[in-house]
Image (cartoon, rainbow, N blue to C red):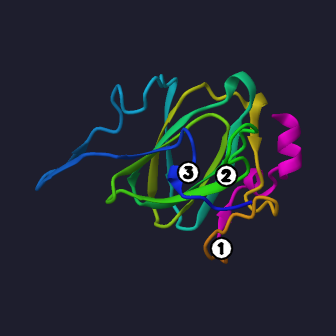
């Protein structure tokens, strides 16, 4: 499959967050009505990753618990990856990637039907998620991050930290059978 530019994916939105800084710190609005049209979020979550080169993903939920995500980096830096698993999409099985940092003030909206993951580029990275459906472990799927059919071009992963769950994800054919 192929890497595509973010604007080639229908439903994906790259959002620039306004950040107001002063000598005391900063203030940002990470979500407000109209930012992601028609989207109601069910849950807010925060992930804190202590180590650089931590790989998470590729995660998704299937069926009635399929999740949209609004992802924002509060502190640190990530390479954020997404894979289109919507069978009716023009970008089916293609992937995209965006560098998100606390300094570039980017957020990404990912609609249901995408596998999602990232690689931390700095220590102590903090990521905020707004999720469009509740976490449902029985509907959770993990697409193997290095599935050869998708062929994501990750940066150097010689010192990667990855959980057993993510290291032992399902291959694309196994995921497709569960969708």
What segment carries the magenta color? 159-179
Please indicate whether residue 12 sits to the left or right of residue 27 in the image.
Answer: right
The label shown at residue 8 is 3
Horizontal and vertical percent for residue 116?
63, 48
What residue does disc 2 label? 57
The span from disc 3 to disc 2 (Cα, nearest Å) is 22 Å
The span from disc 1 to disc 3 (Cα, nearest Å) is 27 Å
Please indicate whether residue 136 sits to the left or right of residue 105 in the image.
Answer: right
At horizontal 74% and vertical 26% (from top left) the residue drawn is: 63
- Of 60 and 93, nearer the camera is 93
Please indicate whether residue 65 sits to the left or right of residue 49 in the image.
Answer: right
Residue 174 visible in this rendered orientation of the protein: yes
Pointer 1 local density, CA inside 10 Å: few below 14, some 14–19, many at least 20: few
Q: Quadrant of residue 153?
A: bottom right
* Residue farthest toward the front in the current orientation of the protein: 90
What residue does disc 1 label? 157
172 inside magenta stretch: yes
Pointer 2 local density, CA inside 10 Å: few below 14, some 14–19, many at least 20: many
């Amino acid at each position: 499959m192929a890497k595509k530019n973010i604007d080639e994916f229908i439903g994906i939105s790259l959002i620039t967050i306004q950040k107001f800084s002063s000598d005391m710190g900063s203030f940002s609005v990470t979500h407000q009505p109209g930012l992601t049209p028609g989207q109601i979020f069910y849950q807010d979550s925060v992930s804190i990753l202590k180590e650089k080169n931590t790989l998470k993903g590729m995660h998704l939920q299937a069926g009635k618990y399929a999740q949209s995500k609004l992802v924002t980096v509060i502190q640190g830096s990530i390479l954020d990856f997404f894979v289109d698993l919507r069978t009716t999409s023009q970008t089916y099985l293609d992937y995209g990637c965006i560098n998100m940092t606390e300094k570039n003030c980017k957020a990404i909206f990912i609609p249901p039907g995408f596998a999602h993951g990232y690689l931390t580029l700095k220590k102590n990275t903090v990521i905020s998620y707004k999720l469009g459906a509740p976490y449902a472990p029985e509907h959770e799927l993990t697409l193997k991050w290095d599935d050869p059919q998708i062929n994501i071009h990750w940066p150097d992963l010689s010192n990667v930290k990855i959980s057993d769950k993510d290291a032992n994800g399902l291959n694309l054919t196994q995921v497709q059978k569960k969708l």
